[in-house]
Image: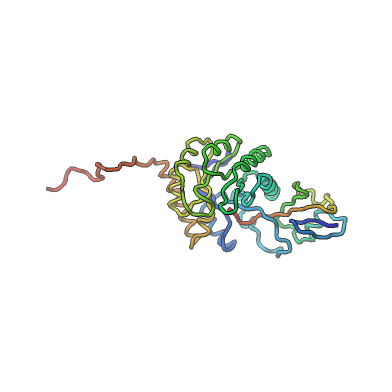
Amino acid sequence: MELWISGESKRFEAPLPVSDLVERLGLAGRRIAVELNAEILPRSRFESTMLADGDRLEIVTAVGGG
Amino acid sequence: MDELVIAGKPYSSRLLVGTGKYADFAQTKAAVEESGAQIVTIAIRRINIGQNPDEPNLLDMLPPSQYTLLPNTAGCYSAEDAVRTLMLARELLGGHDLVKLEVLGDPKTLYPNIVETLDAARTLVREGFKVMVYTSDDPIVAKQLEEIGCVAVMPLASLIGSGMGILNPWNLAIIIENANIPVLVDAGVGTASDAAIAMELGCDGILMNTAIAAARNPILMASAMKKAVAAGREAYLAGRMPRKRYSASPSSPVSGLIE
C-alpha cells in the first residue's frame, strides 16, 4: 500500500498499525505527534489504528522558533 | 510582588523568548537561561525521518518543570494551518493548552493576516486553547481579539526580525489603555533601549527572539534584555517626571551659594 508521510510517498506491506510504522521510521520513543488524514491521532491509539492505502500522515516534533 | 499573570498563572519574568536562529542547542539553552525567561516559544515542524535517533530534541533542553512552553504557529498563512499546527502541539505536549497564534499575510514582511488571525482565534478559543495572539498594532483588532477570549494580545512594535524598534508608540499606548488582558510587544525589538521603551509605555511584557539570537553576543544581549525589561517596568510603575521644555527647577539648592 502507498502512504503519504509528511508529503512524501512511501510503500509498505499491509497490515500495518501506526505503532509499527513509527518503529520502522526509527521514531519509537521520540517526542512526536501524529496526524492521520488531517485528524489528530492520540499516541494511545497508535497500536489499534491500522493504516490503509492512500492514508496521509503528518509526523511533527518541536524545533527552535520565535 | 509585581507579577505578570497569563491565563491565571503568575510569572515573575516579563521577558518571553524564542528559541529560533541560534547557532546550536547549547547557545539556545545558555541564552534562555541568561534571559531569565519563564515562557519560551517553540515551533512545530515535520520530523526529519531517518535522522540519528540519539540526536538531542529541543524538548529535552526545556524541562516543563522549569519553563512554560509556548508552541507557536509561525510560518502558517491560513487559519486552518494554524489550528492544525496547535492541535498537533497540544498532542505533542500532552494536553498543554497555552499557545501563541500567529497567522502571517506575506513572506516578505511577515505582517499578520488579521482576517485569518481572528478566524483562527475563534476556533482555538472554542477548542479550549489559551491563546496569546500576535497581531498588528491596530487597537480595534486588539480589542476584538480580547472579546473573542484570547488570554493576551501581542501587537508588533515593528516587523518580525527587523529590529526596527517601537515604530508606533501611540497605537501601543491606545491598545494598552483599552485592554483588560495582558499586552505584550511581540516582534520588532532590536536592542535593550527598545525593550525599556515598550515597558515604560505600560506593556505587560515583551516576547523577542531575533534581538537576542542575532546579537553579536547573544548571551550578553539576553542579560541586557532581562535588565531592560525589568528597568522599563520599574520606571513605568515609578511614574516618570513630567516633560518640560524648559526647566526652571534646578536639582541643587538655590540658597547658600557662596558670594
Q: Is residue B13 visible?
A: no
The colour scheme is rainbow
x and y, in percent, of residue B257 in the image: 16, 46
**Left or right position of B32 against B250:** right
Total numbered labels: 0
Residue occupying image coordinates x 67% and y 63%? B55
Q: Quadrant of residue B141?
A: top right
Residue occupying image coordinates x 18% and y 42%? B255
**Residue B129 in the image: above or below residue B50:** above
x and y, in percent, of residue B170 in the image: 45, 41
Q: Is residue B114 visible?
A: yes
Q: Quadrant of residue A14?
A: bottom right
x and y, in percent, of residue B50 in the image: 73, 64
Residue occupying image coordinates x 30% and y 43%? B245
**Left or right position of B81 against A8:** left
- The quarter of the rendered structure image containing the N terminus of chain A is bottom right
x and y, in percent, of residue B182 in the image: 53, 40
Residue occupying image coordinates x 54% and y 59%? B30
- In the rendered image, the residue lying farthest to the bottom is B52
Q: Nearer the viewer, residue A65 or B233?
A: A65
**Left or right position of B251 against B144:** left
**Left or right position of B253 against B97:** left
